[in-house]
Image (cartoon, helix red, strand yellow):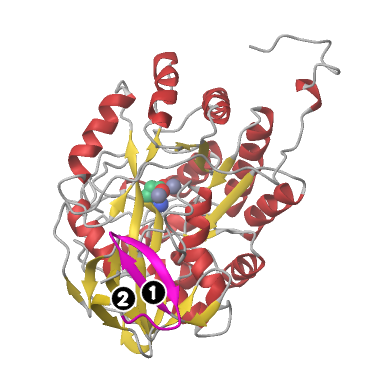
């Protein structure tokens, strides 16, 4: 037989096309796309289903300690399984450097957490919290291993200074790596939070006003300027404001090498959700915080216009108990509650139902936001993120008509912030390199069957950058900039 497996009778959707065809798979790769494949050992019947590239979850916290030292509830087993049930066939969690830790040791720590457990293929974005000279010198080695994206924080205890940020951007840029940033102005947040707490406003809901949109806008503007000066590409994570999205779109329109994402919590929840009695609002504490309904509507426009390239979950699972949200105790103010909420399994069903189902985005835009753009930005194209001959058979088969009310997920969480929302369209079968990971709603893959993905650099063709005159030898008296 020419094929190990054929997917027959489905409607194929990529980031650019929708058409009927069969897919033939051999040795984990797509080898044939044609009208009818009849020579396969094994067949999946995809009649009445949509067949698309498996989702790529590009922002999730798995088996990772937060800045406050709280371990996520999900490890690579529960996290990858939950992601697979949500239509993903690969993911890129973070490997977070601790202060004083070498990058080699950081990578080893996360390899030990991921390799025995993940059902999905995975890579890491490396979080840098302590960019000493020795650590910066290790970066090219990490890059050579195929980890081609780094992340820094402009807030939290793990934040870097602007000078450190410039150093990281500069080394990453020279080696073709992409720097990601959590952009909020730390001092603006700290000043607001202190005023709120000093005034006795300590309940979880005050997390929202403690982190003004202006703090995000300021930090995004600064991050873009720093990246220009360092001549390096930049990715802004979890953009929650239209002002932030506009800065990204404007920079890119001028040649800037800047991309960004938003997340389900900013598209499907609002600040009304954090306004709960008692401590219940803690379930909705994430940073940046939930915004108001007009902000949400304007963010959707940026998703539609393409200024935001991805919708990632920012799955940061801290349970509503003493192991997670309340690891600092129950009698605490909003500043002491772990930041983050789960969403790895809901990201794509929500985006499909509210996006494609309600006519806000096309099916092809959905595929781009769910998978293809992540593969392009994070150096995995053409192996991942598309249905084409030669690509890994990373495929999600969706029932576009199945309606469910969101409830319990397959993660290790004890709540779902999106519970109760009616969602139409669910992934039913997910393949990774041709292996069945989930089939008709049942887990098939074994923990440890995922593989590490060696990634390439971001392709900057067509994004020339925004030259800074003082870096031009003709304008800086031929200065030697080391
Ligand atoms: O509140 C959030 N988003 N927690 C996870 C860490 C981060 O900032 O992405
Ligand atoms: Zn963040
Ligand atoms: Zn995050």
Q: Residue at x 58, y 76 (%)?
A: 361
Percent of width and height locating residue 178: 52, 38
Q: Quadrant of the N terminus?
A: bottom left
Residue 279 seen = no
| Residue 189 place in picture, x, y as percent | 51, 43
Q: Are marks 1 and 2 in contact (CB under 8 Å)?
A: yes
- Left/right placement of residue 251 relative to residue 146 reads right
Instruction: Pinpoint residue 460: horizontal percent, then vertical percent.
Output: 63, 42
**Residue located beneath label 2 in the image:** 6
For image coordinates 32% across by 82% down, the residue present is 38
Q: CA distance from mark 1 to mark 2?
A: 6 Å
> Residue 365 falls in which quadrant of the image?
bottom right
Say which residue label 1 marks.
Answer: 23
Q: Mark 2 and ligand 3: say if the CB distance to the nearest ligand atom is below 8 Å.
A: no
Q: Is residue 287 above or below residue 146?
A: below
Residue 451 seen from this side: yes
Using the image, determine if residue 445 lies above or below residue 109: below
Mark 2 or mark 1, which is nearer the start of the sequence? Answer: 2
Q: Residue at x 64, y 56 (%)?
A: 245
Q: Nearer the viewer, residue 427 or 388?
A: 388
Q: Is mark 1 within 8 Å of ligand 3?
A: no
Residue at image coords 24%, 44%:
70
Locate residue 45, reporting x and y percent. 29, 85
Quarter of the view holding residue 282: bottom left
In the picture, which quadrant includes the C terminus? top right
User: Over which residues does the magenta segment extend?
Assistant: 22-38
Residue 342: quadrant of the picture = bottom left
Q: Residues within 10 Å of mark 2 (few under 14, many from 20)?
A: many
Residue 124 included in the magenta stretch of the image: no
For the stretch drawn in magenta, the main secondary structure is strand
The residue most toward the front is 1
């Amino acid at each position: 037989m020419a094929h190990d497996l054929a997917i027959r009778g489905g409607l194929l959707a990529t980031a650019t096309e929708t058409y009927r065809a069969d897919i033939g798979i051999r040795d984990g790769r797509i080898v044939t796309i044609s009208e009818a494949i009849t020579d396969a050992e094994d067949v999946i019947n995809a009649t009445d289903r949509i067949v698309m590239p498996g989702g790529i979850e590009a922002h999730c916290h798995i088996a990772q300690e937060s800045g406050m030292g709280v371990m996520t509830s999900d490890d690579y087993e529960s996290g990858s399984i939950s992601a697979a049930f949500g239509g993903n066939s690969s993911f890129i969690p973070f490997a977070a450097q601790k202060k004083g830790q070498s990058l080699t040791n950081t990578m080893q720590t996360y390899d030990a957490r991921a390799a025995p457990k993940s059902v999905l293929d995975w890579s890491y974005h490396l979080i840098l919290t302590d960019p000493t000279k020795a650590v910066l010198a290790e970066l090219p080695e990490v890059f050579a291993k195929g980890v081609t994206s780094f992340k820094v924080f402009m807030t939290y205890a793990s934040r870097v200074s602007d000078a450190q940020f410039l150093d990281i951007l500069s080394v990453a840029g020279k080696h073709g790596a992409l720097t990601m940033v959590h952009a909020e102005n730390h001092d603006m947040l700290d000043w607001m939070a202190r005023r709120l707490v000093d005034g006795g406003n300590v309940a979880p809901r005050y997390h929202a006003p403690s982190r003004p949109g202006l703090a995000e806008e300021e930090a995004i503007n600064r991050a873009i300027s720093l990246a220009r000066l360092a001549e390096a590409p930049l990715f802004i994570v979890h953009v929650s404001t239209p002002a932030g999205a506009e800065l990204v779109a404007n920079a890119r329109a001028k040649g800037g090498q800047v991309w960004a994402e938003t997340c389900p919590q900013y598209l499907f929840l609002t600040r009304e959700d954090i306004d709960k009695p008692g401590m219940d609002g803690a379930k909705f504490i994430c940073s940046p915080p939930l915004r108001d309904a007009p902000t949400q509507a304007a963010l959707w426009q940026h998703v539609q216009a393409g200024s935001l390239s991805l919708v990632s979950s920012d799955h940061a699972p801290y349970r509503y108990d003493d192991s997670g949200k309340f690891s600092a105790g129950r009698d605490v103010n909003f500043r002491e509650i772990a930041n983050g909420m789960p969403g790895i399994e809901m990201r794509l069903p929500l985006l499909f139902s509210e996006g494609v189902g309600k006519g806000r985005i096309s099916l092809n835009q959905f595929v781009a936001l769910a998978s293809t753009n992540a593969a392009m930005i994070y150096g995995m194209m053409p192996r991942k993120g598309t249905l084409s001959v030669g690509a890994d058979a990373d495929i999600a088969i969706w029932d576009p008509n199945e309606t469910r009310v969101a409830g319990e997920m397959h993660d290790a969480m004890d709540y779902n912030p999106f519970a109760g929302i009616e969602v139409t369209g669910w992934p039913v079968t997910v393949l990774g390199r041709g292996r069945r990971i989930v089939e008709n709603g049942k887990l098939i893959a074994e923990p440890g069957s995922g593989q590490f993905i060696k990634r390439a650099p971001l392709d900057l063709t067509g994004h020339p950058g925004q030259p800074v005159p003082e870096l031009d030898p003709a304008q800086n008296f031929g200065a030697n900039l080391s």
